[in-house]
């Protein structure tokens, strides 16, 4: 870059700009350009660091990109950023033509003067996890310890039967809504039976409930439904959806998996046996390991539970170095989504935006 060209560019700045302090100059002349013309491709906040370069913080441009430093403070003639915005090199033109093309003469002059001043930049970035400040990420709602909230007071004290009802009533009262009337017994048993078994009640079951005037009549209906084999089939399918159950391997080949039904039946039986949730998860994630130290007659059941890990997509007909890493990655992502409520698949390439992964 010739000194004559540099002088010509700087001469375009108005006299008012020259008298501004370094901070005012950056805030009034430079920051708006960086936000409007550079952040789309070079921003840590937006997760788009083309060429490894971030220009949305001082730390970003000081670190430089994949090809090294882009700004030499005080020396615009040695700064590749200035060379790029001047379009001096056909292989280095920023912003590129497809992103709006060359900056205006005044914008080029402002950035050049900024670098000439030593690139003053008040943007000190806080430690970040992806797009969120580290301190904010520590307080992200889904990572907070479970707390027992205070039971809210409600105006209509006759309606709630349990503490859970009080939370519902409190929110309803905030919206000035009144509860609808209680369902009649025929409607109630139909709703409960469909919810818990996916099937309608029989005429005999309806009649028995209608004739039962005891205070625990509905509780007896619920206990009967929870004890029925159909309960595990109905509610087991919800977990099988989470586990992405199918009778075939998925992906392009989609070949049948004859053993898949054994895992399906394990899930149904676990629901019907009222297996505690922690044990339900532990068997599926590590049942084969736990089976080694458990009773012999429980070995096959626990190993079958690990079908949870084997039921996902398969990217080849047989294990091979070309595909097996994809199988493993899919299992990791499936487990994290279903058990942790997090997608960790993105961490193969970059930090998560909010999660500390």
Image (spheres, rainbow, N blue to C red):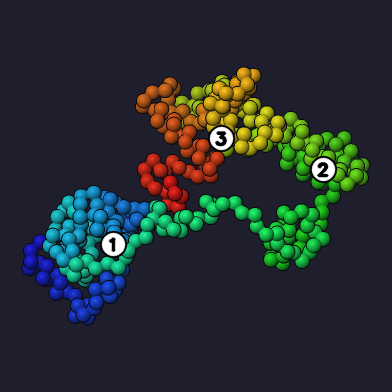
Residue at 59 percent of width and 27 percent of height? 305
> Which label lies toward us, 1 or 3?
1
Which mark is on residue 58?
1
Pinpoint residue 6: horizontal percent, then vertical percent: 11, 67
Q: Residue furthest front?
A: 293
Label 3, label 2: how far apart the Cα atoms are: 31 Å
Crowding at mark 3 (Cα within 10 Å: few <14, some 14-19, many 20+): many
Pinpoint residue 273: horizontal percent, then vertical percent: 70, 31
Q: Which residue is mark 2?
A: 219
Q: Quadrant of the N terminus?
A: bottom left
- Helix, strand or loop at mark 1: helix
Q: Is 151 placed left or right of 29 in the picture? A: right
- Which of the pair 139/269 is nearer the observer? 139
Work out whether residue 274 can be spotted.
yes
Crowding at mark 2 (Cα within 10 Å: few <14, some 14-19, many 20+): few
Pinpoint residue 208: horizontal percent, then vertical percent: 89, 38
Pinpoint residue 62: horizontal percent, then vertical percent: 24, 58
Which is more N-terminal, label 2 or label 3?
Answer: 2
- Which of the pair 301/10 is nearer the observer? 301
- Helix, strand or loop at mark 3: loop
Residue at 72 percent of width and 37 percent of height? 198
Answer with the quarter of the image where residue 243 lies.
top right
Crowding at mark 1 (Cα within 10 Å: few <14, some 14-19, many 20+): some
Residue at 91 percent of width and 42 percent of height? 212
Which mark is on residue 243?
3
- Helix, strand or loop at mark 2: helix
Q: Up-down: is 160 above or below 117?
A: above
Q: Up-down: is 105 above or below 257?
A: below
Q: Up-down: is 105 above or below 245?
A: below
């Amino acid at each position: 870059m010739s000194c004559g060209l540099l002088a010509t560019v700087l001469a375009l700045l108005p006299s008012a700009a020259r008298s501004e302090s370094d901070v005012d100059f950056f805030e009034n002349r430079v920051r708006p350009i960086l936000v409007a013309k550079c952040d789309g491709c070079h921003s840590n906040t937006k997760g788009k660091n083309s060429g490894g370069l971030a220009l949305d913080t001082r730390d970003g441009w000081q670190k430089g990109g994949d090809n090294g430093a882009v700004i030499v403070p005080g020396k615009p003639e040695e700064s590749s950023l200035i060379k790029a915005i001047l379009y001096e090199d056909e292989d280095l033109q920023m912003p590129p033509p497809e992103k709006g093309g060359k900056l205006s003469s005044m914008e080029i002059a402002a950035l050049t003067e900024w670098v000439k001043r030593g690139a003053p930049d008040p943007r000190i970035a806080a430690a970040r996890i992806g797009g969120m400040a580290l301190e904010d990420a520590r307080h992200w709602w889904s990572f907070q310890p479970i707390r027992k909230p205070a039971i809210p007071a409600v105006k209509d004290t006759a309606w709630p039967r349990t503490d859970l009802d009080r939370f519902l009533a409190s929110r309803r009262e905030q919206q000035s809504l009144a509860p609808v009337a209680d369902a009649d017994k025929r409607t109630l048993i139909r709703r409960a039976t469909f919810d818990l078994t996916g099937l309608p009640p029989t005429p005999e079951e309806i009649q028995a409930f209608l004739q039962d005037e005891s205070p625990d009549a509905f509780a007896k209906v619920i206990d009967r439904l929870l004890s029925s084999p159909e309960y595990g089939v109905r509610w087991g399918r919800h977990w099988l959806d989470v586990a992405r159950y199918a009778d075939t391997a998925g992906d392009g080949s989609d070949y049948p998996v004859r053993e898949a039904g054994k895992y399906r039946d394990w899930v149904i039986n676990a629901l019907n046996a009222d297996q505690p949730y922690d044990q339900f998860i532990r068997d599926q994630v590590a049942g084969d390991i736990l089976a080694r130290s458990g009773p012999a007659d429980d070995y096959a059941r626990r190993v079958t539970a690990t079908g949870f890990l084997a039921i996902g997509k398969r990217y080849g007909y047989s294990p091979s170095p070309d595909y097996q890493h994809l199988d493993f990655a899919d299992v990791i992502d499936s487990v994290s989504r279903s058990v942790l409520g997090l997608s960790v698949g993105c961490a193969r390439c970059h930090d998560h935006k909010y999660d500390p992964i």
